Image (spheres, rainbow, N blue to C red):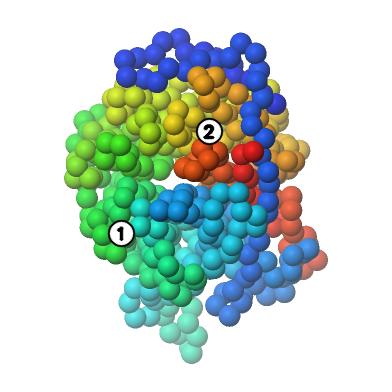
Amino acid sequence: MNMRHLLVGVTVSALAAIPLGAAAQVAPTAAPVGPGFSNTTLYSPTSPAAFPLVPGATTAPHSGQSGNSEPAIAFGGPDNAMVVDGLGQMSVQVNLWKGHFGEEPLSYFGAMDTLLPTNGAGRVNVGDGDADVEVTSAGTVLLADLDTIVNRGVLGGHAPLDSARFGVSVTRCPAEVSEPAGCTSIPIDVAGADRQWITTNGTSAWLSYHDAANSELIRVRRSTDDGRTWTKVASPIPGQGAVTGDATANNRVGPIVADPKSGDVYQVFMTGEARVEKGTSEDFNNVYVSRSTNGGKSWTAHLVHHAPPLTNLSNFWPTLAVDPATGVLWTAWTDQHGIWASSSSDEGEDWSMPLQVSNAQLNTTVMPSVAARNGKVDVVYYGSTATSIDDASAVWNVYDAHLQGGVWSNGLVSNGPNHVGRVCLSGEDCTSDRELLDLFEVAEDPASGKAAVIYTDTTVDTWTLGGVTRRLPQIVLAYEQ
């Protein structure tokens, strides 16, 4: 959802039944401790020439740093390159780092969207709304960016804002490029968009996003030439019978993922109940995964989980990953009181009974992300013992629910609390307490098989304006040890 700047555990339930095609999961009888993680904060400079700091604002103790939040991470290319992005907070830019698993510090690549196309005369195109990043098999970095497209009218010698909308662009950086100046940005949709995701398989790529201006469907674009050009393909929602009725103008889109084993593409999303929730609530209670066997030309949706109406599972996105070695799909979500995971080993047709994989000692959980490789699964999330996201004294940490050898365990990713206080999950309607924004991510290193997590920490830095000191989020890269 578009952003506004600055504004050891247990597994608690076992599977009651495992449908045909679902991957077996075994809950431990004891409480094994998950793997440990190192933690390194990633800092990035502002770009004052293009987007200066808020007038009169200062940052401390890292003066001149942009601050970052809502980070994403991916591996890819012939040398298993690792890329990380973060949404700059004190300047309007998506920051990018590039390197390899285990490197400390990771090399800062630069600010990615300070040179976006203007999409027509009289317009200014500003990035940093949302971001997602992937790497093709050629080593090309593809950054999907949510842009603010502003039309400026001339009145009395000034240029006041007269309208603005959100669009989507993809910035393409070939493997040999060492800075953003060597990248090219392509406008994808300038008519109104929200929360975009990108995935790759070889040198093909798929971009999905929410049509926030018109139908509110999920739109999908495909590239077959390493991100150079993009064409429209079908939406995962129309033609799905009752699913279409539930999801049209009533959905929340999660990641799109491509399976290198089968070539299939999958899109996860949540819906509510058309007769109860459409247009009145975003307490979505259904999790679906749509599958395309022809590159996105057509889709078939399958229900993963149905909860009672007005059960709020959208805290924030449903998440999805495919194990590239086994083809098993994993999805996870939260009802704010636990992280639930389900899997499918028959290409998304049947799904296992949801299993609560989060630490049972936690009362509140938000923003899960999942990654899988060679039968190993990591589901990361923010968790607190506080009973509500609205608790001003809540202490939050980053946790990893870890599946290996058929056994789930829970451990800490962060080496101290990453946030203290309320967490607003109302997207652009938040007026405060939104420094964590709406997501963070985990990915598996293909070379070592270990997890890399990139998360937001609001306890590291501050910024000051008018004598008032505020939290400045920074992102932290954590490596599984």
Name the residue carrying label 2.
378
Q: Quadrant of residue 175?
A: bottom left
Q: Tell whether 214 sits left or right of 123.
A: left
**Number of callouts in the render?**
2
Which label belongs to residue 226?
Answer: 1
Q: Look at label 1 and name its amino acid.
A: Asp
Q: Residue at position x 21%, y 30% from top?
A: 241
The reply to whether residue 311 is in sight is: no
How crowded pointer 1 is (Cα within 10 Å; few <14, some 14-19, many 20+) is rated as many
How crowded pointer 2 is (Cα within 10 Å; few <14, some 14-19, many 20+) is rated as many
Which label belongs to residue 422?
Answer: none
Q: Tell whether 363 sits left or right of 252.
A: right
Residue 472: x, y in percent? 69, 57
289 up-or-down from 142: above or below: above
Distance between mark 2 and mark 1 Cα atoms: 28 Å
Residue 206: x, y in percent? 31, 50
The reply to whether residue 145 is in sight is: yes
Q: Look at label 2 and name its amino acid.
A: Asp
Residue 74: x, y in percent? 47, 49
Residue 350: x, y in percent? 31, 21
- Name the residue furthest bottom: 157
